[in-house]
Image (cartoon, coloured by chain):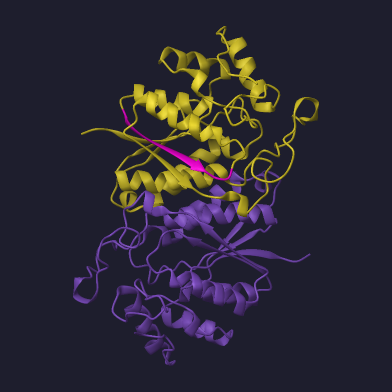
Chain colours: A purple, B yellow
Amino acid sequence: MTKKAVVLLSGGLDSATCLYMAKDAGFECYALSFDYGQRHSAELEAAKSIAAAAGVKEHKIINLDLRLIGGSALTDDIEVPTGDDIDESAIPITYVPARNTVFLSIALGYAEVLAAQNIYIGVNAVDYSGYPDCRPEFIEAFEKVANLATKAAVEGQKLTIQTPLLHLTKAEIIQSGTKLGLDYGLTISCYQADEQGLACGECDSCRLRKQGFVDASLPDVTRYV
Amino acid sequence: MTKKAVVLLSGGLDSATCLYMAKDAGFECYALSFDYGQRHSAELEAAKSIAAAAGVKEHKIINLDLRLIGGSALTDDIEVPTGDDIDESAIPITYVPARNTVFLSIALGYAEVLAAQNIYIGVNAVDYSGYPDCRPEFIEAFEKVANLATKAAVEGQKLTIQTPLLHLTKAEIIQSGTKLGLDYGLTISCYQADEQGLACGECDSCRLRKQGFVDASLPDVTRYV
């Protein structure tokens, strides 16, 4: 029987690497993306290209407008901080309330429909950047919920949240994906990419990514403005 | 300081009672409903009327089309079973994959934005009807996730999932709401209510509700076809 996995795919570097790792682990992959009113809709175009390049079985994009509940620079009308404005000690204002909880929940529903027992999410504890829902203890707690929440779980099919990037540095992530044939030129990490998907090169996310290519000793294939 | 609560409000009997209980407990209430491609959209109209009658501070309706992931009679093109077709031992096919997990997750994001520390959900272990995500152990596990997932939790503001209906019978729920002034004529429980919100009187949900009024020795104010 084919092993199936739902892969949360934002169009960024991490989730794209996750997808290639899931594929490499022998899973038939079902990519799941969200149109949640994010500013950088170029990300969704990137997600489509990555899903196609990886040859996923199915790619669903769920409409979920989190702007209605507000509270984040990515979805509200708040300036995205750059350079010296970034307070490295604080939880970034680019944090979307309960985002990973919401995305994992919908992935859980999708997994149940597919009878998939694995969900891949590209969270990372090294570069976790202050997001509370990227921590290992959060993932463990969600896995417990997942195994109580569904009909499949009641029937004994254990669901696993796969987090292959959890303890990798950005450089290690880039090296892994490159080995698996992922073209990082397709991915977008920038918080304020333009309509063509060109990165600003200055925001928190761009800076982490740039340094990752430097540390990986690999050419930075990112398309900048 | 005003105590705030997010209340999941479907437009049904249970969630409406929950809202009145939250109000009675002194909370400023923020109702949250979902347009998830359910057949019975009359439910959403009912939710609006109930929210207005209860005098909530705000009522948000989030668009989230779960039909995209399929898997349920409420959102797929599957017949809703009635009468003798109902298999009482099985998890009903009206089950929406991971629904309560998804709804609680979005409520969690809304609660964080509001700095609310309470989420009310009308789950019930007595009449839980085979839904795995209505069980106490599911709610406890989700509360743990909630307290690890958010910036507010990291800063020490504990979030509580309030389930005042958990151990009440349908009759006790109806008696409680009636005492608090809730007009059950505004609520819709039917899985296949028509556009005017008239109930079929025959589906699983209608049967439970009917019996509830009988057991509560209160007149059934439901509007039937």
Q: Is residue B167 visible?
A: yes
Seen in the image, is B27 located left or right of residue A122?
left
Q: Is residue B166 visible?
A: no
- Magenta region, main secondary structure: strand
Say above or below: A220 vs A72: below
Say above or below: B219 vs A111: above
- Which quadrant of the figure contains the N terminus of chain B? top left
- Asked if the magenta segment contains residue A170, the reply would be no
> At which x and y percent is residue B209?
61, 20
Total numbered circles: 0
Query: Residue farthest to the front?
Result: B196
Give the residue drawn at x 64%, y 64%: A5
Seen in the image, is A108 located left or right of residue B62?
right
Say above or below: A21 vs A108: below
Q: Residue B179's quadrant in the figure? A: top left
- Which quadrant of the figure contains the C terminus of chain B? top right
Seen in the image, is B89 located left or right of residue A65?
right
Q: Looking at this view, is B170 or A58 the one in front?
A: A58
Q: Looking at this view, is A78 or A105 the one in front?
A: A78
> At which x and y percent is residue A44?
49, 69
The magenta region covers B27-37
> At which x and y percent is residue A101?
46, 53
Give the residue drawn at x 69%, y 57%: A114
> At which x and y percent is residue B189?
58, 27
- Asked if the magenta segment contains residue B29, the reply would be yes
